[in-house]
Image (cartoon, rainbow, N blue to C red):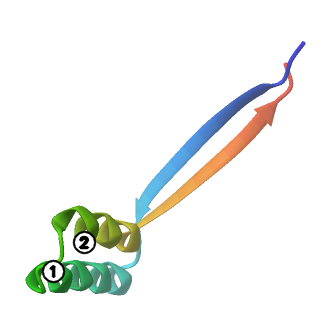
Amino acid sequence: MLPRTGVTVDICPRELPIALIGTAGGVLALWATAPAAIAVPVALLIVLDIRVHRWRRRT
């Protein structure tokens, strides 16, 4: 028997002050003519709490 492996990705919004800072940073970057392909993902990483868990279970 082989162990089963899996990945769980948890995405939840951060607290309001951090979310406002991330949104303001993204808008400021877009206002300063930064490419949207860079500004939007960075703002989302600040606004969202993303956790990746790898787990292994014996069968």
Location of residue 36 (image quadrant): bottom left
Across and down, in percent, residue 38 comes to 27, 67
Label 1 – label 2 distance at C-alpha: 8 Å
**SS at badge 1:** helix
Q: Residue, x 17% and y 86% (percent of image)?
A: 28
Q: Nearer the viewer, residue 38 or 58?
A: 38
Q: Is residue 50 above or below residue 31?
A: above
The mark tally for this picture is 2
Q: Which quarter shows the C terminus?
A: top right
Q: Is residue 57 above or below residue 33?
A: above
Give whichever of discs 1 and 2 has the lower sequence position: 1
| Type of amino acid at the residue the image marks with label 2 | Ala
Task: Say which residue label 1 marks.
Answer: 27
Q: Residue, x 44% and y 55% (percent of image)?
A: 11
Location of residue 21 (image quadrant): bottom left
- Closer to the eye: label 1 or 2: 2
**SS at badge 2:** helix
Q: Dot 1, how many residues are within 10 Å of its Cα: few (below 14), some (14-19), or many (20+)?
A: some
Q: Residue, x 42% and y 60% (percent of image)?
A: 12
Across and down, in percent, residue 20 comes to 27, 83
- Please indicate whether residue 35 sits to the left or right of residue 14 in the image: left
Task: Say which residue label 2 marks.
Answer: 39
Across and down, in percent, residue 44 comes to 32, 66
Q: Which quarter shows the N terminus?
A: top right
- Please indicate whether residue 17 sits to the left or right of residue 26 in the image: right
Q: Residue, x 34% and y 87% (percent of image)?
A: 17
